[in-house]
Image: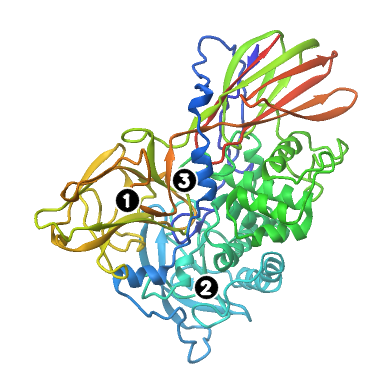
Amino acid sequence: MAENKLGTTVIVAGIVALLCCLCVLLAGMAGVGYYAFIQVTPTITSGPTNTLELFRPPADTISTETIQTLLQSTVPENDVYELACRLQDKCNVPKTLPAPAMPLTVGTTQKFWLINADTNENFQMDATLLYITPLTYFWAEKGVEVNEKDMKALMDEFDEKIIPTDREFFGSEWTPGVDNDPHIYVLYAGNLGSNIGGYYSSSDEYNPLVRQYSNGHEAYVLTSSQPLGDQYAYSTLAHEFVHMIQWPTDRNDVSWINEGFAELGAFLNGYDVGGADWAYVQTPDLQLNDWATNDSPDFGLHYGQSFLYLTYFLDRFGEKATKALTANPENDLASVDDTLKTLNATDPQTGKVITADDVFMDWAAALYLKDGNVGDGRYTYHNYADAPQTSATETISNCPQAPITRDVHQYGIDYINISCAGDHTLTFTGSTAIHMLPVDPSSGLYVFATNLGNESDMTLTREFDFTSVSGPVAFSFSTWYDLEKDYDYLFLEVSEDGEHWQIITTPSGTGDNPSGNSYGWGYNSESNRWIREDVDLSQYAGKKVQLRFEYVTDAAVTGEGFLLDDVSVDAVNYKSDFESDDGGWVAAGFSRVQNIIPQNFRLMLITKGADTTVQTIELSSDQTATIPLSLKGGEEATLIVTGTTRYTRKNTTYQIEIR
């Protein structure tokens, strides 16, 4: 009999205060919500209701070509000034504004742009400068009540503790910054949206001539619904200041790295990170290298997961290695790999350089054991005595156990507890392949796809010679897209000289621009299916031109991206379905890929008896393993299972049987 990993989430006021950071749009917003998570695990019997299936196609049909392509792909950072010049003819815009002619004084009033996260609407408010410190200005929206004592205590601690602590560990923000003033603006205002405690907007780092809703200052916004004396006001500022530091140093890193380090910033300042870590350990099957949208039930859990992983990294490898990780130019798990390789961090048990996957598995065991007496002491938190401890997601108490099929996220964790006394053999069989994309190509096996990347600018460009064409020119292609609504856009562009580009109006694009992120007519939101687009290029007959698909993303949240297939220009007899080659297109951030990629797993076995042991289980190339179990009465074993295929958001499946 097996107890499946089903749970109930209950919100109970006042039990756990969960600090979340709502990082959406280029603004990178942060919010605070209050949650309590109670998980109830019902007992069920595995049987015919189990509809999960293994995906094990013939080995010769699973190609590693796509993985190699993605490993070699680089996602370029966006350059807002270059984009504004090239696409909007806003050129030679200075990156800094003139310094204030006179020092600001208490009582000064000024207008500021804010955004409501519920509606994605930008609006202006009037604020009054109430307090000045050597490093900050505190502004409050007119009409908002401010406790002067709490305000001064918060701003003084921000100056004297939070700023130096975060700077020492993570580096410095851009200073004197866009406004040539070393002061950081703290705005206290309302109407930010439900559950929004505050946010840092990286768009404020730009000249308003290229970002229409920029305030042109290094700034934070705190919600006036949160008392300034509340501990989470302090934690929020410590968290958001890390984001301000990240912007000039590594602004296009992925959300779990950025948010995990921001939570670590609050922790290093001695503040409660709010309970997201405790919420996460109730449901540890969550993909580490992904980030949910703010309306997802998993949204808050990602903060806890990323914080716990990076806090474990700090505990395991120390301050020097963690500072190196914050500064590493690589992104995502590759930055963990590269940092450990650069430092030649080797595992004394194997003699091999430690990888991000190795750290993940040791961390998974540490979450479960939280015991520094096991092994060489790596399976606990020495720097976080109050770290939460996870428990089994499933229990098998009667053996033999007929085959049961389960699913697990990539870099999520299943803990299968086995308490069958006697000698048994556990057989693990994993899926050998996984879908990388949400949909199959429009035709054939290959498609061009954007990569996942924050604050990025990905292009796919090709030259077409229409000099011998006098009649109509139609450019046709098939596309499927899922782009963050109102914030990430893909543009189709044309150029006659390679320097000046015009955005083309497409049938399924939009001119809406609520966030100020769009540079013109572009694709946004979701297509929901493959669609066929036909674009009239007849005005370019008789000319040689370049066509370009350009995908520009902001911070934090990204959709699945933009897929392109079956491109044709009948006027010059051009057709490409990308089956044999790239069709002459030059990619920067796009990749020609197949939808089926290899699936890999990692396994670890914890045995608790007179002693507790941790064993890494080696898998065959076909993702199978045979594990002998010999348990006495009162002893138990726990199998840790995770998928380790990095380039997909899809869950994978596996099967276990005990004989």
Residue 454 to residue 531: above or below: below
Which circle's residue, 1 or 2, is located before the other in the chain?
A: 2
Which class describes the residues within 10 Å of circle 1: few (<14), some (14-19), or many (20+)? many
Residue 158 to residue 418: above or below: below
Q: Is 628 on the left or on the right of 494, as rendered? A: right
Residue 562 to residue 437: above or below: below
Q: Residue 186, image x and y in percent?
A: 54, 71
Is residue 291 visible to us here?
no
Q: Secondary structure at mark 3?
A: loop
Q: Residue 475, image x and y in percent?
A: 21, 50
Q: In the image, what residue type sits under mark 3?
A: Thr
Q: Residue 125, image x and y in percent?
A: 39, 70
Mark drawn on residue 293: 3
> At 36% from the left edge and 60% from the top edge, which residue is drawn?
515
Mark drawn on residue 218: 2
Q: Residue furthest bottom?
A: 102
Q: Is 190 on the left or on the right of 242, as rendered? A: left
- Tell us which disc is closer to us: 1 or 2: 1
- What residue did someone put label 1 on? 524
**Based on the displayed image, in which of its 4 quarters is residue 347 positioned?**
top right
Q: In the image, what residue type sits under mark 1?
A: Asn
Could you give the CA–CA distance between mark 3 and mark 2, rounded to whole angstroms?
A: 25 Å
